[in-house]
Image (cartoon, grey):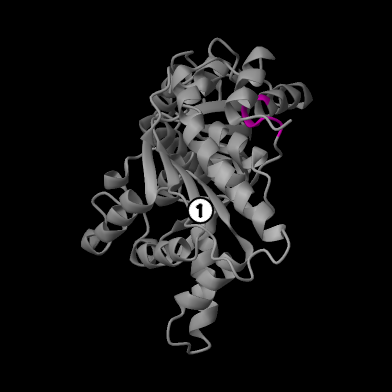
Amino acid sequence: MRQTLTELYDARVAAGDLRPDAAQRAVLPALEEVRHWLEETSAKRRGLLGGLFAKPPAAPKGLYLWGGVGRGKSMLMDLFMAATGIERKRRVHFHAFMQEIQKGLEAARKTETADALQPVAEAVIAKTRLLCFDEMQITDIADAMIVGRLFQKLFDAGVVIVTTSNRVPEDLYKDGLNRGIFLPFIDLLREKMQVVELEAEGDYRQHRLAGAQVWFTPAGAEAGRAISSIWAELTGGDRGSPLVLPVNGRELVVEAFHNGVARASFWELCARPLGPADYLALAGAIRVLVLENIPHLTASNYNEAKRFVTLIDTLYEARVRLIASAADAPENLYVEGEGSFEFGRTASRLREMQAADWG
């Protein structure tokens, strides 16, 4: 017998996989209504002559689920996504989706089509009845300029959209360049989607990490196993997928990302020629960073050390949770050479970021 989303949620709570949260549970009936419509209309289309003569009923409003970090928004969307029994559905990080759209536009413009967005939207519509976006956040003017027209085409075609965000719609692209062109998109979201605030009891990632060790030394096999265990717990066992962030006309790629948690090595983030803009984009897109294999820092890797200091400062200001493996304790990472004295502030911040109530 088909279980409702509320029943599935309650079963996970009973099994100890979730902490009971009344605010999370209260969101499920709205998602269940969308799920029911999608499954029922899909079944009718599969029926005899289904879809040939009868016009399908109008799609219900989607759901714009917003709230503070770690409230469980992505978990609820994943529960809904997994339980919805249709074929043409997709869950994707919003940044990654918009990168696909921009690449599609570049290709369409080369064909000199009158409206480059039309074939790009049609390609999405052909494959999708349900689009689930994780972490809608618009920071790039190129995205801001086309997102309204894109969503209008998707809505007109009956595509149902469910998205999570840390921001109320009115705060999307806040203080962005030429924001006036973006404002009609906010009205469109309000018209086509239920805007629901998730006022949950607390950050579930904090509960999972509260009191747990988050700094592992020395970096090695044992530390790697411990960090892999934490990664598995935070991501539900997901291996992660690349996070692609637009930064000043190029892309910053972090190979492992899931549900607000990113995983990278020191060398991946500090040996490449990255700068403050890259780290700001990263800190804005994640809530937890798992950073592995931080080495001893000396004059021989001074540039890497400078980037590491910038990275930690950025994570600190954004209140991003840090889980790390390192060659030594923070105070012993950089003890001699140019920049070692100033590193004392970074070591202090690394200590502060290990506190149970950080983030």
On the picture, is 190 further left or further right than 279?
left
Q: Residue at x 54, y 15 (%)?
A: 20
Residue 216 drawn at (x, y percent): 64, 20
- Secondary structure mostly seen in magenta is helix
Q: Residue at x 74, y 30 (%)?
A: 1
Stretch of the chain drawn in magenta: 233-237
In this rendering, does residue 214 appear at all? Answer: yes
Q: Nearer the viewer, residue 316 or 131?
A: 131
Residue 87 lies in quadrant: bottom right
Q: Nearer the viewer, residue 216 or 137?
A: 137
Q: Residue furthest top?
A: 211
| Label 1: element kind | strand
Please determine whether, in this image, residue 100 is positioned above or below residue 305.
below
Residue 261 lies in quadrant: top right
The residue that label 1 is drawn on is: 160
Residue 12 drawn at (x, y percent): 65, 20
On the picture, is 129 further left or further right than 172?
right
Please determine whether, in this image, residue 165 is positioned above or below residue 88.
above
Residue 185 drawn at (x, y percent): 31, 58
In this rendering, does residue 338 appear at all? Answer: no
Q: Residue at x 44, y 67 (%)?
A: 153
Residue 18 lies in quadrant: top right
Q: Is residue 136 magenta?
A: no
Q: Nearer the viewer, residue 351 or 341?
A: 351
On the picture, is 293 further left or further right than 289?
right
Residue 287 drawn at (x, y percent): 48, 33
Q: Residue at x 40, y 51 (%)?
A: 277
On the picture, is 173 further left or further right than 356?
left
Q: Which residue type carries mark 1?
A: Val
Number of numbered discs on residues: 1
Please determine whether, in this image, residue 357 is positioned above or below residue 184.
above
